[in-house]
């Protein structure tokens, strides 16, 4: 079983829709949670970064972490065609030891249709 | 502009050939990473380095080698021992202290001729 599970999609929504992307994980030591956006044939770029449980909002994007359920989410409000990309969740247990390795989900491919 | 530069963007390897992928960063980051991305498998860690002249194997190091002679540079060699090298290779870097965030280059797509 993978440490991080993410539905690969593809997910297709109309412009303006609210998008919900999710990851579940099994390692209770994970404390740092990230969402990256990756456009086709490009490197991932950081969207959101959260520590422990709670919510974080940045513009149209909201990240939620529920450590008790080992579940994280990314919500995109008023989705735009420019949001069409693959979204990767990533997690890390500690900062300095073991190189602060990130464990990634498989990525969810999102298409927002005009 | 500060960032991570990977070159070349596309690379072709012949059977039995070693090829080297370049990764350079001017962010003054201490740690650097190499990942391999395949469809349906997400990003898998090949090697990482937290400091110059030191590096550790990741989850799929077999058939790959790295060096870290300079803080700015972390080249990856795909050796002939890597029997399935076709993939998208991503280099990342991180400040050593204070953050787990990794920043990525634009990637190199390697194909076998």
Image (spheres, coloured by chain):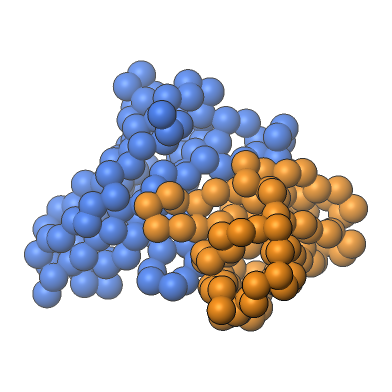
Chain colours: A blue, B orange
> Residue A29: where, in percent of width, then height?
53, 23
The reply to whether residue B41 is visible in this rendering is yes
- Number of numbered discs visible in the structure rendering: 0
Q: Quadrant of residue A3?
A: top left
Q: Residue furthest front?
A: B15
Residue B66 lies left or right of residue B15; in this view the side is right
Instruction: Residue at 47% x, 44% y: name it.
Output: A104
> Residue B27: where, in percent of width, then height?
71, 65
> Residue B30: where, in percent of width, then height?
77, 53
**Quarter the C terminus of chain B occupies:** bottom right
Instruction: Residue at 60% x, 79% y: name it.
Output: B12
**Quarter the N terminus of chain B occupies:** bottom right
Q: Quadrant of residue B82?
A: bottom right
Q: Is residue A66 above or below residue B39?
A: above
Q: Is residue B84 above or below residue A104?
A: below
Residue B60 lies left or right of residue B50; in this view the side is left
> Residue A79: where, in percent of width, then height?
19, 62
The reply to whether residue B90 is visible in this rendering is no
Residue A77 lies left or right of residue A32; in this view the side is left
């Amino acid at each position: 079983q993978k440490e991080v599970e993410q539905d690969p999609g593809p997910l297709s929504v109309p412009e303006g829709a609210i998008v919900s992307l999710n990851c579940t994980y099994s390692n209770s030591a994970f404390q740092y949670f990230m969402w990256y956006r990756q456009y086709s044939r490009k490197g991932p770029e950081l969207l959101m970064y959260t520590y422990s449980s709670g919510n974080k909002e940045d513009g149209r994007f909201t990240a939620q972490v529920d450590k008790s359920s080992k579940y994280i989410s990314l919500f995109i409000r008023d989705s735009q065609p420019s949001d069409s990309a693959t979204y990767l969740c990533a997690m890390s247990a500690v900062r300095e030891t073991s190189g602060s390795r990130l464990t990634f989900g498989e990525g969810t491919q999102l298409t927002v249709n005009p | 502009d500060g960032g991570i530069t990977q070159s070349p963007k596309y690379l072709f390897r012949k059977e039995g050939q070693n090829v080297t992928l370049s990764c350079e960063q001017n962010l003054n980051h201490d740690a650097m990473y190499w990942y391999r991305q395949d469809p349906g498998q997400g990003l898998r860690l090949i090697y990482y380095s937290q400091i110059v002249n030191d590096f550790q194997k990741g989850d799929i190091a077999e058939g790959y080698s790295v060096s870290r002679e300079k803080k700015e540079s972390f080249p990856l060699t795909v050796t002939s021992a890597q029997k399935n090298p076709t993939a998208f290779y991503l280099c990342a870097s991180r400040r050593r202290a204070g953050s787990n965030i990794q920043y990525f280059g634009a990637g190199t797509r390697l194909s076998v001729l």
